Image (cartoon, grey):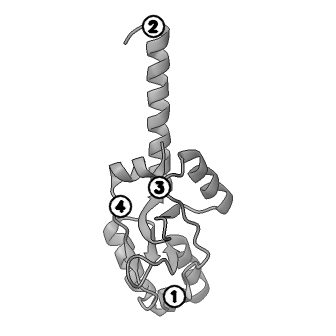
Amino acid sequence: MNVQSILGVKGSEVATTTQTATLADAVSELGQRRIGALVVSGDGRAIEGIISERDIVRATALGGGEALTRSVGSVMSTDVVTCTVGDGVDRLMALMTERRIRHLPVVDEQGRLSGIISIGDVVKARLTELEQENQALAEYITGAR
């Protein structure tokens, strides 16, 4: 299974925010959408950064409640790891594990934002793969078709 098949099931909508939004704005958006990260993009296509719940928690731990008045741009991660539609689940798992991240923006051939994959999406895809493999093995063993 690859990114393209995952996006085919979940869709390619990506929640974004701007660098000038406040952390309070980001918290509100994350809560309303029930997601863990926002891609930072002024035009919805070019990736400027990413801000996750973890980034906000760290900023709040250092600055207290006042941190929520800071801009997203002052806290976001700018070293954004991305993937492409052709990447397989194994590659996604390796990237997420090595980099200790939970969200991978998907980019097209021109490097434009075209989706996002979360760790939950990867786990769901891998479980689907395992279920299909188990079913195929069971059918093989029993001779059922």
Residue position marked by numbered label 1 in the rendering: 73
SS class of the residue under badge 3?
loop
Indicate which disc, 3 or 4, sits on the residue closer to the N terminus.
4
Q: Residue 61's x, y, as percent?
A: 59, 81
In the rendered view, would you say 50 is above or below 121?
below
Q: Position of residue 116 (x, y in %)?
A: 44, 62
Pick the front one: 45 or 63: 45
Q: Earlier in the sequence, mark 3 or mark 1?
A: 1
Residue to which mark 3 is pinned = 85
Q: Secondary structure at mark 4?
A: loop
**Image marks 4 and 2: residues in contact by CB distance under 8 Å:** no
Give the crowd class for mark 2: few <14, some 14-19, many >=20 residues within 10 Å: few
Residue type pointed to by label 1: Gly
Q: Quadrant of residue 28?
A: bottom left
For label 3, the crowd category at 10 Å Cα-Cα, with few meaning under 14, some 14 to 19 and many 20 or more, is some
On the rendered image, what quadrant is the C terminus found in? top left
Query: Do the numbered discs 1 and 2 sit on residues whose CB atoms are within 8 Å?
Result: no
Precedes in sequence: disc 3 or disc 2: 3
Find numbered disc 2 in the image and state the secondary structure of the residue it sits on: helix
